[in-house]
Image (spheres, rainbow, N blue to C red):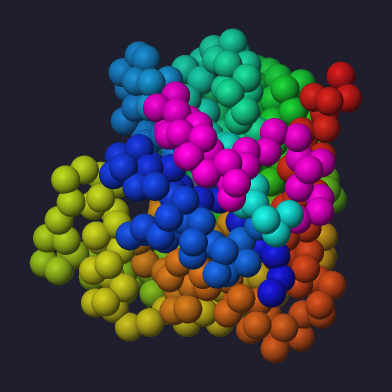
Amino acid sequence: MLPVFDCHADALQRALDLGHDLGQETHGHLDLVRGRRGGLAAVVLTAWIDGPYAEEPGAAKRRTNALLDAADDLFARHPESLCQVVDGARLLEPDPSRLACVLAIEGGHAIEDDLDQLDHYAGRGVRVMTLTWNNHLSWARSCRDGAGAAVPEGLSDFGVRVVERMGELGMLVDLSHAGERTFYDALEAAVAPPMVSHSGCRALSDHPRNVTDDQLRALAQRGGVLGIPFATAFLDEDERRAEQAFRKTEAYRNAGGDNATERLLLEGDAIQSGMPPFPLERVADHVLHALEVAGPRHVALGADFDGIDRRPAGLEDASGYPALLEVLGRRGVDQETLGLVAYHNAARAIAEATATAAAR
Ligand SMILES: [Zn+2]
């Protein structure tokens, strides 16, 4: 079984909000047990900070630190089977005995406009930051509409300083969710090649979260990597419309849950059982297109497990990666390229990013 590196998973919020031990089999998408079944050798575990945390001073910092505490607790509980990696060079050879976890933050509002806070997170072992989530920042525009006049077109001067400081700290710049201008500004300002950890191809599905072929070529030219997501709404426009209709049904609206994290999980159960299976081939389409445009060294996988509701058939959880790799092989991807997409491109990106701190 090929080792897999997943560039984006939101599982930490289940650990914090639902008390799930990700070292065991849990009700959710990604944990150690199912990951092991799927060949998962490394994962970027993301502290996702929802937009509303940006509105109250101190709230985003508190939420971020609480999610990182949950990660510390997870690593302390399972030292024999999980390890936190801060030096990406350790990822270049996959270690079958332990799942390597790289900590990330999704949403630059986590730093609350304070570069010292970025240093604090780096000190806690965070090695990836997705500059924006769907909310706009005072220093960076996201890919969503509705930015007011106070939001810069791309990165502000402070935004450029954030990206440069990330380079000094050995943190990888993740440009999923970034607005197009932010993407190009960050590509220029970044010290190491950036990643777009969980976005599809706009040429196949016109969604603002996906990247255009021009962006894909620019990313590849810069040495970066695109992680193809399993988020069905990004992958197929017709399916997205059908999902929007399903989300209005009683079955979805009454899925239950005591908090947002549990709600997302139960909505995921409702939509998986209530809608026809989403074809796994569609995920393969995006991988193949990205390979064609960007080349074999610039495509990876970024499922976004535990951050999405609907998943493709066969890719419901972290045990499913071999099914996708099998389809890719059947559709003509050679073994070497499969290995790059499944693991090595992501490992190289993290290794290059963390090396910028080591080199100082
Ligand atoms: Zn995301």
Hey, which residue is sitting farthest bottom in the picture? 330
Q: Is residue 71 magenta?
A: yes
Hey, which residue is sitting farthest right in the picture? 359
Asked if residue 218 lies left or right of residue 237, the reply is right
Q: Quadrant of the N terminus?
A: bottom right
Snapshot quadrant of residue 189: top right
Snapshot quadrant of residue 268: bottom left
Snapshot quadrant of residue 38: bottom right
Q: Look at the picture and state if 301 lies above or below 16.
A: below
Q: Which residues are magenta?
A: 65-94
At x 52% / y 28%, what residue is drawn? 108
At x 11% / y 67%, what residue is drawn? 250
Q: Is residue 274 magenta?
A: no
At x 48% / y 72%, what residue is drawn? 315
Measured as percent of width and height from the top left, residue 293 is found at: 77, 66
Q: Look at the picture and state if 143 lies above or below 34.
A: above
Q: Look at the picture and state if 359 lies above or below 223.
A: above
- Given residues 321 and 196, the one toward you in this image is 321
